[in-house]
Amino acid sequence: MAGAVRDATVAELSDLRVGKTLAVWFSDDHVWHERLVLWPSGTTPTSYYILTPDDDVYVEELDPGVSDGPARTRIKGDTFNYWSRFREGTYRFSQGVDDDEFKRSIEIAIKESKDAGTWDDSKVPPTLLDRKGREVSTTAYLGRVVSRRRMTGKGLHQGPQLAAGLGVADYDPDLKSRMKPLVVAPEGYVWISEEASKAVGLGEELLVERGRGVMVSDEVGLVMLRGDWIKGRLKKVVDVPSYAEELKGRYMDTALPALEELETGAAAGVSKADDEEAEAPEDIRILRVDYDSQGDRYKDYKESVRELSEHSFPDWPHEGPMSVLHLAKHMLRSGGDPKSWLNEWSRAKEVGEQDRVMYELRTLVEAFHYACTYDQLNVASLSSFETLARRVQAIVDAYASGPRGSPDWGSARYLTGYKGPEDAVSPQLISWVSRRGRNRPTWPTLERR
């Protein structure tokens, strides 16, 4: 392109590379919107899964003659080079999308494509553009996300093969008449797990998606959740507490005799250290460890917040109430996760990406994000994260209290609990002196003659 800015043709839109950056214009709007191409949708040649500045992933049809989507589209590097050449305003990503976020977004797009039935192994693009604009191998870049088979030893393995004749049997007619796709719980009901797994505990609510499983009766189903098949049952909300206790009772009745036998048989060989470890209570500092559908360690932020719990300690080092759980819930409600919340906050307060406070906040927020999604810690009960959370809240309070562009840090000292050299005087001693001064009798002043 010689420098002129123009709209892309339908032919150009039909041949977009994964990783391309777009600018789209809607007829009912007044700004251009930035888009990142994630994956072909598999429906039409000009529709793609895209990532938006609001961290949304969905299919967008780019041919204005096919749908009521964007009226105009431009391709960075092909039909324009610089955003500054646009005469109209632009709505863009507040910070650059890195390779990790790009891969996660592609994984979401691929999963949605498979769920929608539009996935085609034969149409996986051989190459894509990474976040530095380099052309790289798709399979090498995405790994297991697009792997269609895996190596074992010197040969290829595609999973266990059925013996001859086993794959042609049909369901029993009576069973077949009962089977139907999984449905979400109707009003007043919830799906309850009837077994424990790495994905969910016994008697806990199952967050099902329509069609992501199979129902074998009107109230029993097999639910696909994070790569596991979980047996679930539809129960009235009011009956859930008693049913959960009933389930736990069943497991205890079955497991206790086996446990007692195991303990009796192994008692002679158990060391004191092993005994103490076995009797140690569950560590409240960590959450149940979850994995995604590819087997990687990952817990959705929303699920992490749901599992967080506050525990009080007699030697808690911070003054005042615990605040991490409140902050975690606020980030979920206001942005969806800590990183998205920071984008919303910086945009609302007009804090630039190069502002010094943004470097600090990004570090604090990323630590918070990974603690919940990868480390899977119960941050609501950790003093270290109470320190981080109070610093985040002190910054937010300063920008809320002062005029635009001039934060007021007056409350930061109390929010963070900072103690300086001048705090050597005991607060109890100060309080005692104050009370002593108030209770001291006042003597009349004698007038000189």
Image (tube, helix red, strand yellow):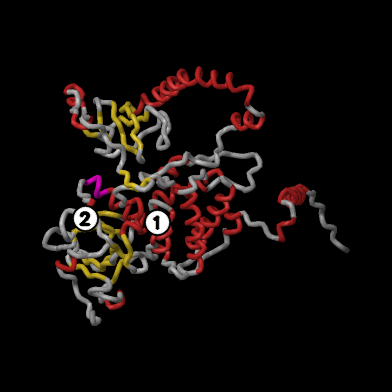
Crowd rating for badge 2 (residues with CA inside 10 Å; few <14, some 14–19, many 20+): few
Magenta residues (range):
112-116
Mark 2 residue element: helix
Q: Nearer the viewer, residue 265 or 101?
A: 265
Q: Position of residue 402 (x, y in %)?
A: 50, 65
Q: Nearer the viewer, residue 149 or 112?
A: 149
Q: Nearer the viewer, residue 357 or 55?
A: 55
Please identify the residue farthest to the bottom as the structure is shown: 2
Q: Position of residue 310 (x, y in %)?
A: 53, 40
- Left or right: 260, with 225 as reference point: right
Crowd rating for badge 1 (residues with CA inside 10 Å; few <14, some 14–19, many 20+): some
> Which residue position holds label 1?
340
- Quick check: 243 above or below 432? above
Comes first in the chain, label 1 or label 2: 2
The CA distance from mark 1 to mark 2 is 32 Å
Q: What's the residue at 36%, 24% (across, down)? A: 239
Mark 1 residue element: helix
Q: Nearer the viewer, residue 404 or 75?
A: 75
Amino acid type, callout 2: Lys
- Left or right: 43, with 254 as reference point: left
Q: Position of residue 44 (x, y in %)?
A: 15, 56
Nearest to the eye among marks 1 and 2: give it: 2
Q: Is residue 113 magenta?
A: yes
> Which residue position holds label 2?
123
Q: Position of residue 37 (x, y in %)?
A: 27, 61
